[in-house]
Amino acid sequence: MKIYLDTIGCRLNQSEIEKIGQQFRQAGHTLTDDPAEADAVVVNTCAVTAQAAADSRSKIRAAHRAGNARIIVTGCWSAVDPDGAASLPGVHSVVMNDNKDLLVREFLELTPEVFDVLTHHAETVRQPLPGKHQRTRAFIKAQDGCDNFCTYCITRIARGKARSTPLDTILADIDTAERGGTQEVVLTGVHLASWGQDFTPRQSIADLVRAVLAHSRIPRVRLSSLEPWDLDQAFFTLFEDPRLCRHLHLPLQSGSDPILRRMARKITPAEYARLLDWARQAVPQLAITTDIIVAFPGETETEFAESLEFVRRMQFADGHVFGFSPRKGTPAADYAGQVAKAVRKERSTRMRAVLEEARQQYQRQFIGTRTSVLWETALPEGGQWRLGGLTDNYLRVSMLTQAPRHNQIDDVNLRSLREHDFEAVPTGEEDSDYKASCSR
């Protein structure tokens, strides 16, 4: 049987769709990057914004138009609207998030015993998905669910209570990735920094990172989004190990204290600023990125101005800006003072401009420096290869070379900063005039 896999949204969804693909392969089936030739389609949906939900529905409809009558829908949007998912044309079944681990077994109608034999091979190695969801980096699911009550968030409803993946399972998944040639793993979850808090005895995200670094040889370990209130000053000593990537995504959501309270976020702007001071003192050139919501219900122009100025002072390396998207079932969807669409758009534009200025300022300091890059793409260009990849501190880099270096880590010199990435040359190939200009 040929299986087509599609996903939208977060890194956790990417991790889960890779696991689903691995299980189909282990059961003897093949993956295809063309839904028109597939016997079955799995769509892993997202509900974080109204647009993400709409995109999820669009992907399901596109799979049906491709001619496939057996579409399995799972993920957050289908969890909050299972009837809506089931009513779409071509949908064979809807699998809730808490049953996603059994999706392949139940679709193939395998007994637990047979499924365990097929999918628990010591020699299993990671194979990236074919097509547009192919990733050099391996996303490792370390946690699921959330016990916070942020008033705007539908994910807690869609994913349920927080639960940590056992350490031995995480290490086994990393081992599978390592034996498949993976150079970087990304630990991911809905509330990743809560890892271990549901264990007895209680553990922490720092314990997880130490164990991963101690029990694997993966060249790079990266952390996905972490809620800032879960981190203390000691956490940043973990970066003494150079394998831990110098990049933290710490969602702020607003720089206005009253807005954070209405969001039920467990941090104040002052506490967030102190955390960033700790991080930057401990980890030079650390890239700190964030998420910002503008036009939250009741946000005044004064509160938005406070948020804008705070974001400017934090000097993020990059960030995502979202105009508030009311999600049915969340408290904020019913709050008074819903902000007009035109105001949402205008505030989003202003906030993105501040983040863009900070991004450029952060990146300019690296022009003319030497760093290492993990190449994620290699495309032919004029008889050579155009490589694209990431540094450990999340700088995007492009370089022309004589040979494809996909999934390899190379030292390069960052020659110039373009609009969205750096142009690099291999170490030793920069000319003396250029080196002289960099020293001035």
Image (spheres, helix red, strand yellow):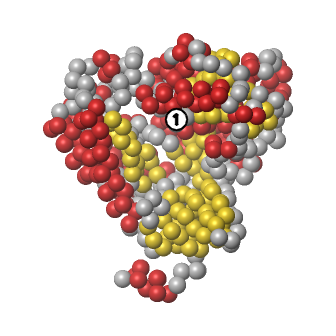
Q: Give the residue displayed 71% in from the left and 40% down from the top.
A: 33
Farthest residue in the left direction? 302
Instruction: Measuring from the top left, give residue 333's x and y in whole percent.
Output: 33, 20
On screen, residue 125 above or below 25: below
The picture places residue 368, in percent across and down from the top left corner, at: 45, 74
Residue 134 vertical position relative to residue 375 in the rendered view, above or below: above
Q: How many marks?
A: 1
The foreground one among 184 and 367 is 367
Could you say where residue 182 lies in the image, as x and y percent from the top left? 68, 51
Q: Please identify the quarter of the rendering in which residue 282 is found.
A: bottom left
Query: In the image, what residue type sits under mark 1?
Result: Gly
Quadrant where the image shows the N terminus = top right
Can residue 387 be spotted in the picture?
A: yes
Q: Residue at x 71, y 26 (%)?
A: 68
Q: Residues within 10 Å of mark 1 (few under 14, many from 20)?
A: some
**In what quadrant of the picture does the C terminus appear?**
bottom left
In the picture, measured across the screen, residue 333 lies left or right of residue 162, that is: left
User: Does 399 appear above or below 81?
Assistant: below
Residue at point 79%, 17% (across, down):
109
Query: Which one is nearer the viewer's eye here, 237 or 31?
Result: 31
Q: Label 1, secondary structure: give it.
A: loop
Task: Tell me the residue that label 1 is attached to.
Answer: 9
Residue 236 relative to residue 6: left or right = left
Q: Is residue 42 visible?
A: no
Residue 173 sits in which quadrant? top right
User: Residue 226 lies in what quarter of the image?
Assistant: top left
Image spot of residue 346 (x, y percent): 26, 41
Question: Eyeballing the image, is 395 above or below 344?
Answer: below
Left or right, 353 with reference to 251: left
Q: Nearer the viewer, residue 31 or 65?
A: 65
Q: Residue at x 55, y 12 (%)?
A: 83
